[in-house]
Image: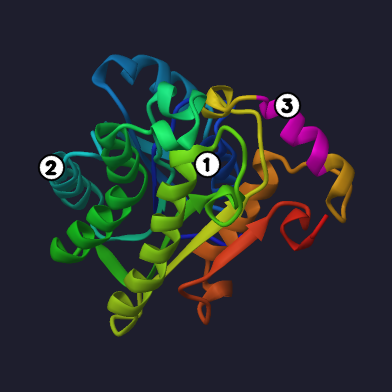
Amino acid sequence: MLLKNKKILIMGIRNKWSIAWGVAEMADKNGAELYFTYQGEENKDKVEKLLSELPNFKKAYACDASNDEDIERVFKEIKAEAGKIDGILHSIAHANTEDLRNDFIYTSKDGFAHANDVSAYSFVAVSRIAKELDLLNNEASLVSLTYYGSTKVLSGYNVMGVAKAALECSVRYLADNLGSEGIRVNAISAGPIKTLSSKGIKDFNSILDIVEEKAPLRRNVTTDEVGNAVVFMLSDMSRAITGQILYADSGYNIMGI
């Protein structure tokens, strides 16, 4: 088991269809002691019912990842109750619906700031606050989730593509800043998956069809497969890897036409 005796925090769990849930299942199967954050105290009962299915689930915390003070509060609670941790998955992103439905040129200033704050800066804040609070064990691993729309124009992805590009660049700078302390920072670029968030992308089903037709493996990916990629990045098997964007997309990203 790749994560035996490791304490892993998964930030942004929502439901059974989320990539974060796929990661949680694979991390649990690989022996991790699991902690979670979720958005909104009103979601507590629903989230805890879901997480109770995992044998290694320890505790979940409500956390607004767009608020540095809230991140700090939760991280202090985790350290007091669990001690230092070995890895964090950042599975947090959001953009206003109108900024995904309309052409990118009509993105509002507030919408642009919101998407980048929640989807990219929150990972910077999580990394910094974890470092400042000495929450991370030696050789800890930080992982975020990104998407192909960060490098290519995809209809309907719009400002989220810009935010993911900022996230990927942040991964590289964070890897440089934290590398001297033995902490690794990477991201997984998952292929398109039907999640609650994907419903906001116009013509999302057509993207799934194109990947199935064009990707070298001729199929889409599952949350479990992305979960396995994250587990690898959180484990000691990836100790020499940092600052990287690892594609788990059936190879679609290599194709030209």
Which residue: 14% across, 61% down? 133
Q: In the image, 135: left or right of 103?
A: left
Is 203 placed above or below 9 here? above
Q: Which residues are magenta?
A: 203-211
Image coordinates of residue 69 in percent, x first then y, are 10, 43
Residue designated by label 3: 205
Which three-letter amino acid code belongs to the residue tagged 2?
Answer: Arg
Q: Earlier in the sequence, mark 3 or mark 1?
A: 1
- Using the image, tell me which numbered label, if any, was put on residue 24: 1
Image coordinates of residue 222 in percent, x first then y, are 71, 40
Which residue: 35% across, 15% down? 45
Which three-letter amino acid code belongs to the residue tagged 3?
Answer: Asn
The label nearer to you, 3 versus 1, is 3
Considering the whole magenta stretch, tell me its main secondary structure: helix
Q: In the image, 7: left or right of 77?
A: right
- Using the image, tell me which numbered label, if any, was put on residue 183: none
Q: Secondary structure at mark 2?
A: helix
Image coordinates of residue 157 in percent, x first then y, are 54, 37
Q: Secondary structure at mark 1?
A: helix
Residue designated by label 2: 73
Inter-mark Cα distance, 3 to 1:
25 Å
